[in-house]
Image (tube, grey):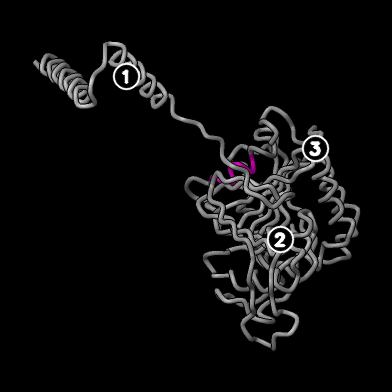
Amino acid sequence: MPSESESPIDSPTPGPLMIVGGAEDKLRRRSVLTEFVRASGGSHAKIAVIATASSLGPEIVEVYDALFRKLGAADVVSVRPVTREQSHDAEFVEALSDVTGIFMTGGNQLKLSGAICGTPFGEAIHAARRRGAVIAGTSAGASIQSSHMVAFGTGGATAKQRMTQVAAGLGLVENCVIDQHFEQRNRYGRLLMIVAQSPQLLGMGVDEDTAAVVTVEGDHEILRVIGRGAVTIFDPARIVSNAHEASRSSPLLTSGVVLHVLPQGATFDLTTRTLVPAPAVAEAAEIAEAGRDLRKLARDIAAGDVSPSVLRRRKSRRRKDADQTIEADETEASS
């Protein structure tokens, strides 16, 4: 991600996506929103709030305006087309031409997609990302970022035929379907239903106050998780399912789906659909202690052939001497 001193607009690679599962913390740590403002340029950020999905309109824009400015953004603008006609209006399109971050609010994702997908305004969002702007969205604004979008449906842990409907999204993440409020509203079943019916899609469920941050690195799209929850990935590439013949509302056979549950700090390669292992980094203190133990052992061996019991006694004496030294120091300090 670009540093605070470097405007994202100058980035040679597409800007990051921030797919937020909804109900992001706005009062205390605000880790997800803080990261969005930082990635958008910090004190140089110009952020467009798209509240098309929300029924609150100006009120929700005011909330995010105050939050983003408090977190250090230089400017926040409201851009809210509510009809497809407005999404063809040059004034709305031009409003996204110089922003460094775009934030799509929650609400009704079908209302959002119906207003902007396949319009010049929708293309302006893609263009903003291509020149380096950060594209973020929470709840409905998260779902619309995938190529296929959950339109509506019921919750539940068991995948059932026709438990949800799918609509076209913006396609910022290709070959994927995104669901939000995932763990909190028990949406495992409906995401499984979608990938059972469309096994070319990767299913992504994002918990509340959690973000899947997607960056382009070379030829790969890399997902990193921030926030207090997890991102759940369903990979149905080798699924066995009866979705083609199951009757209405009946449970679906879904076998062979690869499951990934990714908490904060986890990294996943969306291109290869594989977990990126965390680097093995030992603590400096542990390394130093291991080195001291090895040196002591070498000295003991060099001293002559000694039995393990003798080595244990020597080690015990060293610990006792060390404890006595610490006790003496503490006694002297308290006197």
Viewer-nearest residue: 325 or 78: 325
Assess whether mark 1 and mark 3 are in contact (beta carbons under 8 angstroms).
no
Residue furthest to the left in view is 335
Numbered tag placed on residue 202 in the rendering = 2
Residue 260: x and y in percent read 59, 56
- Residue located 63% across and 61% down the image: 258
According to the picture, the residue beneath numbered tag 1 turns out to be 297
Q: Earlier in the sequence, mark 3 or mark 2?
A: 3
Q: Earlier in the sequence, mark 1 or mark 2?
A: 2
Horizontally, residue 326 falls left or right of residue 190, namely left
Horizontally, residue 223 falls left or right of residue 11, namely left
Residue 105: x and y in percent read 67, 58
Numbered tag placed on residue 56 in the rendering = none
Is 332 one of the magenta-colored residues? Answer: no
Please identify, in this view, whether the residue under mark 3 or under mark 1 is nearer the observer. 1
Horizontally, residue 97 falls left or right of residue 58, namely right
According to the picture, the residue beneath numbered tag 3 turns out to be 13
Assess whether mark 2 and mark 3 are in contact (beta carbons under 8 angstroms).
no
> Toward which corner of the image does residue 112 lie, by quadrant?
bottom right
Viewer-nearest residue: 162 or 114: 162
Q: Residue type at mark 3: give it.
A: Thr
